[in-house]
């Protein structure tokens, strides 16, 4: 099956050129559909060939991978030290291959490109796109990992994150993407609501007459999840005695119903979620370390909304659509958008959803959602800082650049390139509209883009 990718050769030493050409020819024979390397508009993965590690290579990687947003495979035709390979990863490479044998290299490149394409397809499928909304880099890189773990493995998953960040939603998505043939159901058990007297029955089920009131036999969560997924929500609330029992089932995959002597087999994927710092619980002896390492096959930490502001407006549009499914969702006026981007969300996405509900209460149904829709208690207090567009994220990025020894000129240059990239993306590549957004002439923008391409 053909796979789309761009190829780029960083160093042009004569002795390497023929090997690189051979690799490129083989890749094309193996079904690579070569794509243009226009980093502003393509989300296509790529391969960089090089024979040595240089600061210029790292810069190019940073640029071509858009700081790690796009999958780029760095292929070194000679071996490089581990430190240098880590630097390439840090600069945005998704993987580093060092290999001197061309045929092996081509195979390894192809398997990675196929995997990335499959992951991309899943990320862009309705099952994912219509469930977990947001396009921030933080969410996208988590989604990439989640999709791979969910689809290509049966590994247990532990989802961490503050309240309202979407842990339950993610657990359901993992179950949806699970590729086990004829997989069973998703069984959800909220550990914070289990009453200790009845916990045995909730987990293990019981036989008829096992205790007073047990008028019929009943399956518990372990039996119901057989062949499917068991989602233990709020796992940090699980009492120590239940942790011990759970550990046995996970290890042995067998259990007994309350009141029965017969062992029953079960097999499920385990997903756990908590907003607690589970490692700190382990250190304090409140959570069994052996259980922690059993449930934490793959650990995913959903970042709070304040760390992924790019998700706020897409989520807001999604909730507007969700609330008024029969109507075209109203547009948010620019000051309302800015208000949403600036406010705090202690309850994360759940909080944002409630804000949208409150905005809709005052919305008349005509035109866009205006500042008057913001309830008086929610309105911001005007400060000088509110009028400044440079926020903590901007300061943080500049500080990181300065710490890395990047000077004023390169920082200004990067800010300009980022602005051009954003404007081109926002206008779907329409040069005229992008130039208007940037406040420059079409010609000036054209020239800047041409200069940018030359540097690459
Ligand atoms: N990325 C997202 N896209 C769409 N809806 C989301 C997203 N993240 C969270 N939500 C919505 O926000 C609300 C809270 O999500 P969820 O219940 O999954 O959070 P949680 O982390 O499990 O919270 P808690 O710790 O309080 O149980 C739900 O209505 C969910 O549908
Ligand atoms: Mg939850």
Image (spheres, rainbow, N blue to C red):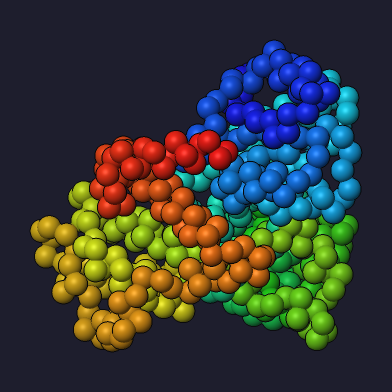
Q: Residue at x 80, y 86 (%)?
A: 284
Quarter in which the C terminus is drawn = top right
452 above or below 344?
above
Measuring 50% from the left and 46% from the top, which residue is drawn there? 128
Residue at screen point 49% across, 69% down:
393
Q: Quadrant of the N terminus?
A: top right
- Horizontal arrangement in the rendering, residue 23 relative to residue 67 (left or right): right
Q: Who is closer to the viewer here, 74 or 44?
A: 74
Residue 444 in view, yes or no: yes
Quarter residue 365 falls in: bottom left
Residue farthest top in this picture: 29
Q: Nearer the viewer, residue 177 or 145?
A: 145
Return the residue nearer the eye: 44 or 15. Answer: 15
Q: Residue at x 65, y 70 (%)?
A: 403
Q: Is residue 338 left or right of residue 73?
A: left
Q: Nearer the viewer, residue 203 or 392?
A: 392
Q: Position of residue 6 (x, y in %)?
A: 60, 29
Does residue 130 appear anywhere in the picture? no
Q: Is residue 456 above or below residue 405?
A: above
Question: Vertical placement of 207 versus 13: above or below?
Answer: below
Question: Toward which corner of the image does residue 44 lie, by quadrant?
Answer: top right
Residue 158 position within the rendered picture, expressed as x and y whole percent measured from the top left: 69, 62
Q: Name the quadrant containing residue 235.
A: bottom right
Query: In the picture shown, does residue 391 fall above or below 178?
Result: below
Q: Position of residue 2 (x, y in %)?
A: 61, 19
Instruction: State left or right for residue 347 relative to residue 295.
Output: left
Residue 295 in percent (x, y) is at 77, 63
């Amino acid at each position: 099956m053909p796979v789309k990718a761009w190829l780029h050769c960083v160093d042009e030493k004569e002795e390497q050129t023929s090997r690189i050409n051979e690799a490129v020819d083989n890749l094309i024979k193996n079904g690579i559909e070569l794509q243009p390397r226009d980093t502003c508009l393509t989300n296509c993965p790529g391969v960089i060939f090089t024979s040595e590690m240089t600061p210029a290579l790292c810069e190019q990687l940073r640029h071509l991978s858009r700081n790690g947003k796009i999958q780029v495979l760095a292929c070194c035709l000679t071996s490089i030290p581990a430190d240098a390979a880590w630097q390439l990863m840090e600069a945005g490479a998704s993987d580093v291959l060092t290999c001197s044998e061309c045929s092996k290299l081509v195979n390894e490149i192809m398997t990675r490109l196929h995997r990335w394409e499959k992951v991309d397809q899943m990320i862009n499928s309705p099952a994912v796109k219509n469930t977990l909304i947001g396009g921030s880099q933080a969410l996208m890189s988590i989604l990439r990992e989640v999709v791979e773990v969910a689809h290509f493995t049966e590994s247990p998953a532990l989802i961490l994150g503050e309240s309202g960040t979407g842990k339950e939603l993610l657990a359901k998505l993992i179950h949806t993407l699970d590729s086990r043939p004829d997989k069973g159901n998703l069984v959800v058990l909220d550990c914070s609501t289990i009453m200790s007297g009845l916990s045995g029955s909730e987990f293990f089920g019981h036989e008829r007459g096992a205790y007073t009131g047990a008028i019929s036999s009943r399956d518990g969560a372990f039996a119901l999840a057989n062949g499917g997924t068991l989602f233990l929500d709020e796992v940090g609330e699980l009492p120590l005695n239940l942790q011990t029992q759970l550990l046995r089932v996970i290890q042995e995959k067998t259990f007994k119903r309350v009141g029965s002597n017969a062992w029953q087999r079960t097999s499920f994927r385990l997903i756990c979620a908590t907003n607690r710092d589970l490692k700190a619980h382990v250190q304090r002896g409140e959570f069994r370390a052996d259980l922690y390492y059993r449930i934490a096959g793959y650990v995913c930490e959903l970042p709070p909304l304040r760390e992924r502001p790019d998700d706020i407006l897409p989520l807001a549009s999604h909730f507007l659509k969700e609330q008024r499914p029969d109507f075209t969702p109203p547009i948010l006026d620019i000051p309302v958008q800015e208000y949403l981007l600036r406010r705090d969300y202690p309850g994360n996405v759940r909080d944002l959803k409630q804000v949208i509900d409150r905005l809709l209460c005052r919305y008349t149904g005509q035109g866009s959602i205006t500042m008057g829709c913001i309830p008086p208690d929610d309105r911001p207090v005007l400060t000088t800082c509110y009028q400044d567009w440079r926020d903590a994220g901007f300061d943080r990025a500049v500080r990181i650049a300065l710490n890395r020894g990047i000077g004023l000129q390169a920082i200004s240059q990067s800010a300009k390139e980022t602005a051009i990239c954003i404007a081109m993306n926002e206008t779907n590549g329409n040069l005229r509209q992008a130039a208007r957004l940037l406040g420059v002439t079409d010609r000036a923008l054209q020239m800047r883009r041409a200069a940018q391409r030359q540097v690459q």
